[in-house]
Image (cartoon, grey):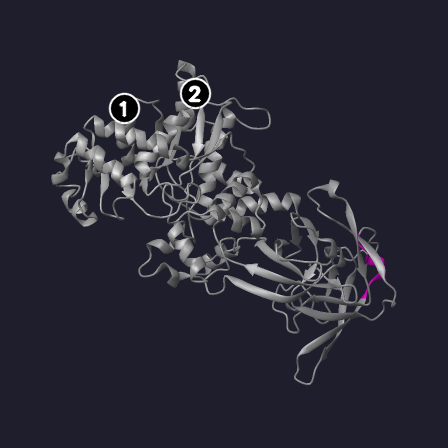
Amino acid sequence: MTTGTKDSPEKSLNFLEEIIEADLRSGKYHSILTRFPPEPNGYLHIGHSKSICLNFGLAIKYGGKTNLRFDDTNPVTEETEYVESIKEDIRWLGFEWANELYASDYFDILFDYAVDLIRRGLAYVDDSSSDEIAELKGTPTTPGSRSQYASRSIEENLHLFIAMRDGKFGDGQKVLRAKIDMTSSNMHLRDPIMYRIKHAEHHRTGKKWCIYPLYDFAHGQSDSIEKVTHSICTLEFVTHRPLYDWFIEKLEIFASRQFEFARLNLSFTVMSKRKLLQLVQEKYVGGWDDPRMPTISGYRRRGYTPESIRTFAEKVGVQKRDNLIDVSLLEFCIREHLNKIALRKMVIFDPLKIVITNFSDDVEFLSSEDNPEDPGTGRREIPFSRELFIEREDFSENPPKKFFRLSLGQKVRLKSAYIIQCDKVIKDENGKIVELLCSYLAESKSGSDISGLKVQGTLHWVSVKHAITAEVFLYDRLFRVEDPSNEEGDFKDYINPVSLHVVKAAYCEPSLRNARFGERYQFIRKGYFCLDRTSSEEKLIFNRTVTLKDTWAKEAKKQ
């Protein structure tokens, strides 16, 4: 058990914490070093946030450090843009790495390691095609057969490997393979490929190299070079661990150790970088940071806070078995945080004008709390005038039972203002309601109400002549099914057709003229919002982060 405090109860250790504490107690390590090793071939998504929080969090808890190491061994798919986005995402989440490193930093060392294995008869150059290699590997239930090229002499293998490095062969003509066991039940041990030829410019090393190590040869050795004590991977790398250990043992280098945990799978989304890239390239979304994307940059643009994502990662916990996490848990975490920090504002999406017939043409400035959850945020003044906008849905000419909003002859309270009553409905020539004539009770002012009246409905509103306009993007879940990757057919067939609704002209209380990037707002009765990065003084644009309540849960109950 961990030591609790009066503010936080004691919590059981997860299995990784148990391993680390045992290693520290035994003196195996005096301090720990973890690493976060993303491949810079796309933007980080919410699944990566769990790994980031885990690797950095463990190091912080036990007084260790975390390296950021880019697994940049495939020059065809990697870009500097992705490197910079990854660094921005990690810092935004609240973490700082001890060292910024790259697998490409070790290309010379890895080449020497490969030469060492060749000299010891543990690696050979294979001329077989990829199809031939796959066929000779056998199947999980039938043993493989070793390539005819495995019998080459050490001298010939050295000569050919150096010729590969020197660009004497074309892409795919030769590979370097480890000589392990073609009959192993673990397919990764059946003479795995260590190096392949790729005549492509690398984002850091340029044209220096035309051979590049594969993940299994680069990863464990990079861990060892850095003296990573606890190399934490997701469960799909369990079967890679024997190969990780084999390379370290044969090379007689620092024995980093690999441990695996369950990756984060989130409902109503996809986590594959390949699929996310499809969504971007085929313009189903506006880019990697589209607020509907499960990328960290997408969540940031949508208004999620780093605190909410860290809380989410903590609540998900560390498991040894893959499962599908309901996205509503993530939405719960952001609602919890935004309720505490968001400034309250009144914004009308679909306006219906009301005229307070017994109110003068003067303007009265009323006081309203910025955030009732945080008295320290203070209060703001809101102009109240004769002509106001309310939401059109907040009036019903023929109200159903338990309709506590405005109707003819019905009284409601206007938020932080007065009780009003609808006296008359004005329609245009087509019968559409265009205006409501109302009266107010002067003695019912919020904060000093002496009217004695109690009403059940409270509406938000804005003053017509003081309102400012903004464009509002109402985002929803990108997919309409829980697990789109496991449905029949193309995953894109399950995209939610109403994942975005745009309110071209919302009417806002004037204090939003001073809205700032980084601030969070609750549009009263509408949800939580933030300024979009494309917003300007000339045109305010807000993104909905999340609704006030889980509307999907209601829909599920209907079905």
Callout 2 secondary element:
helix
Q: Residue at x 53, y 48 (%)?
A: 297
Q: Residue at x 74, y 40 (%)?
A: 376
- The residue lying toward the viewer, choosing from 441 and 105, is 105
Where residue 50 sits: x, y (%)? 46, 39
User: Is residue 258 visible to us here?
Assistant: yes
Q: Residue at x 70, y 70 (%)?
A: 352
* Labels 2 and 1: the sequence-earlier one: 2
Q: Is residue 441 magenta?
A: yes
Count of numbered circles in the view: 2
371 up-or-down from 34: above or below: below
- The residue lying toward the viewer, choosing from 414 and 346, is 346
Position of residue 466 in the picture relative to residue 157 (left or right): right
Region rendered in magenta: 440-446
Position of residue 367 in the picture relative to residue 189 (left or right): right
Where residue 67 sits: x, y (%)? 47, 31
Q: Which residue is mark 1?
A: 249
Q: Which residue is mark 2?
A: 21
User: Is residue 480 visible to us here?
Assistant: no
Disc 1 residue crowd, few under 14, some 14–19, many 20+, Cα 10 Å = few
Q: What amino acid is at disc 1?
A: Glu
Q: Which quadrant holds residue 234?
A: top left
Where residue 270 sits: x, y (%)? 41, 52
Judge depth for marks 2 and 1 and give the one in front: 1
Position of residue 319 in the picture relative to residue 445 (left or right): left
